Every structure is written in C-alpha cells, then in structure tokens.
Image: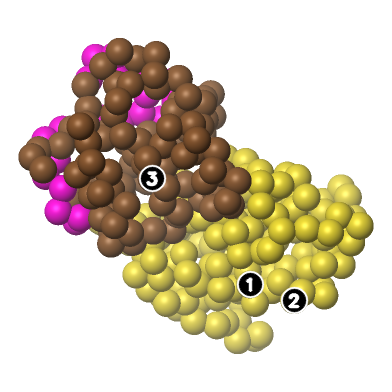
Chain colours: A brown, B yellow
C-alpha cells in the first residue's frame, strides 16, 4: 500500500481533523487530504481531486452520507473509490443501508485509532 | 421497541440513567482519553456558559443537552484536537457539539429496539447561561452531573412521551 489520497466528509471540522489524525496513527501514509462539510460539497470536491479513500459521516446538512454514497457512481473519477462510513448512527438498519448503498466499511463514533486501522486497512488492501 | 409503552415509562422501568452515564463516560474516555468522576450531590451545577443540544426524533423523542463552563468547553476542544489546533471559539462550539452528538448516538445505540427508529438532529450550541429550558410536552428528564478535570458537566436527557 503506497501513499493514499483521502477525502474526509463531516459537517464538524473538529471531527475531520480527528479522523485525519486517526488515519495517520493507523500507519496510513497520507499524500493528500481534502475535506468537505456535506455530501453535495464532497461530490464537487471529487470532480477536481481524485482520491483513493473516502471517510464519510452520515448525519449532515444539505446531503447526508447515504445519499452521497448513492450519488458517488455519477462521478467518473470516483465511482470505484472505497467509502468507509464514520458515524454516531450505530443501528443495524443504518449499517445495512450504508453497505447496500456501496460503502465498504462502517465505524461507529466514538472510535479509537485502532478501530480506524481495523476497518480502513482491509478496504485499502482490497482496492483494485 | 414496544410502542404501547411510553418512553417516559420505559425509561423508568429499564432504569436508563446508568445507561446515559455509561454513554457519557465512554465518549470522554475514548475521544478525550480521560475518565469522568462522579459529582457529589453537594457539588454545584456547572456555570452553564456553554450548552450543546441534540434533538432526538422518532420512537425515542426528546432533547439531549450537555452543559458546562468555559474552561471545560475549551479543555474538551484542546483534548480532542490538541492545543496547537484550537485557534477559534467556533472550534470549541464544534467540539462540544460533537461530544453531545456522540453521547446521544452512543446512548440510543445501547437501547434495545430503537434500531432505525430514532433520528438525531445536527448539534446546536448555545453560549451564555441566562436562559430557561421549557419542554412544551409532557415527559421525563434524566440528568447526571459528572466532574471533568474537577469541573462539573451536566448531561440532561429530556424525554417526550
């Protein structure tokens, strides 16, 4: 696994920083990190910034994380990018919705760096 | 979840207060790396300079608030981000709002039967303590005050029937 370009989508700038720090603590060599505050903004960011990994919250204003994952297929350079959801929504139905919408992993907040490592590394290793 | 039993009744029968306290404790331990201490009943309430709120809608309906003083709110942001990254008051609001969000999510995830039937709002943070909280529907409130680095933090869950 080489250098990774990541997009972090969360309406909280504090959480975006914590997720980035957790990725680094997980030993992921980040070449570039871009951020967005909601799903709609993230779709725009992706058009100009190809990435290898997306970490995305669910509850966000404007466009939530589930809708973002559903619309990701419309972005030519991002349709095969793995998405891991990071969210307070821990119920089974949300996990099922997220995975059936195309997400490859699911991390519940609050989370430890070890949990990020456990869920993100396998996704990156499976990346085509 | 049994919809015929009101949430207020269920919270009493199932004794939700320890679940709320555990939810708070876990968030502080995991995200801030610190353990909260129980506050003695004689301990004063927090100054209430910062109040974060999250609405819950669906079968579990109400408002969860986290209330603390300026020092505690700043310390939460510093513990989450690191002192060098806390450069504005907006980050303090954001950090406290996220703590409130995670407590609400952690709490509802611990209750059986709320699967997919309880939605959380995005957080709101109020600064200043000169206000009164009025719930306009019947219900029940659960409240716990714990000490964070020696200062009280109050977490209140107002449940609507």
**Label 1 to label 3: alpha-carbon separation:** 27 Å
Q: Chain of mark 2?
A: B
Are the residues at dot 2 and dot 3 in contact (C-beta closer than 8 Å)? no
- Residue identified by numbered label 2: B15
Residue situated in front as seen by the camera: A55 or B62: A55
Residue B12 falls left or right of residue A122: right
Tell me, yes or no, whether the highlighted magenta stretch contains residue A33.
yes
Split into 4 quadrants, where in the image is the N terminus of chain A? Answer: top left
Q: Chain of mark 1?
A: B
Whole-percent x, y for residue B135 in the image? 82, 51
Q: Residues within 10 Å of mark 2 (few under 14, many from 20)?
A: few
Q: Is residue A21 visible?
A: no
Are both tags, 2 and 1, on one chain? yes
Looking at the rendered image, the disc whose residue lies closer to the viewer, 1 or 3, is: 3
Circle 3 — which element?
strand
- Residue identified by numbered label 3: A105
Residue visible at 60% across and 59% down in the picture: B109
Residue B45 falls left or right of residue A107: right
Q: Chain of mark 3?
A: A
Residue situated in front as seen by the camera: A108 or A118: A118
**Label 2 to label 1: alpha-carbon separation:** 8 Å
Q: Bounds of the magenta span?
A: A25-49
Residue situated in front as seen by the camera: B39 or B48: B39
Circle 2 — which element?
loop
- Residue identified by numbered label 1: B19
């Amino acid at each position: 696994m080489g250098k990774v370009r990541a997009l972090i989508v969360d309406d909280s700038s504090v959480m975006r920083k914590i997720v980035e720090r957790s990725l680094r603590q997980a030993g992921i060599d980040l070449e570039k990190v871009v951020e967005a505050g909601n799903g709609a903004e993230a779709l725009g960011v992706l058009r100009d910034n190809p990435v290898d990994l997306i970490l995305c919250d669910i509850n966000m204003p404007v466009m939530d994380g589930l809708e973002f994952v559903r619309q990701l297929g419309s972005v030519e350079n991002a349709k095969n990018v793995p998405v891991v959801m990071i969210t307070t929504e821990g119920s089974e139905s949300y996990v099922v919705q997220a995975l059936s919408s195309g997400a490859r992993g699911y991390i519940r907040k609050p989370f430890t760096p070890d949990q990020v490592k456990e869920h993100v590394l396998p996704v990156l290793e499976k990346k085509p | 979840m049994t919809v015929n039993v009101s949430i207020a009744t269920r919270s009493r029968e199932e004794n939700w207060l320890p679940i709320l306290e555990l939810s708070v404790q876990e968030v502080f331990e995991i995200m801030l790396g610190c353990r909260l201490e129980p506050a003695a009943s004689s301990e004063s309430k927090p100054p209430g300079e910062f109040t974060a709120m999250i609405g819950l809608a669906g079968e579990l309906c109400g408002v969860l608030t986290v209330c603390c003083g300026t020092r505690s709110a700043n310390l939460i942001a510093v513990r989450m981000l690191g002192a060098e990254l806390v450069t504005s008051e907006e980050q303090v609001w954001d950090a406290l709002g996220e703590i409130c969000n995670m407590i609400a999510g952690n709490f509802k995830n611990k209750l059986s039967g709320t699967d997919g039937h309880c939605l959380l709002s995005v957080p709101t943070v109020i600064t200043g303590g000169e206000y009164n909280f009025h719930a306009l529907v019947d219900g029940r409130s659960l409240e716990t005050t714990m000490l964070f680095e020696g200062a009280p933090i109050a977490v209140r869950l107002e449940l609507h029937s």
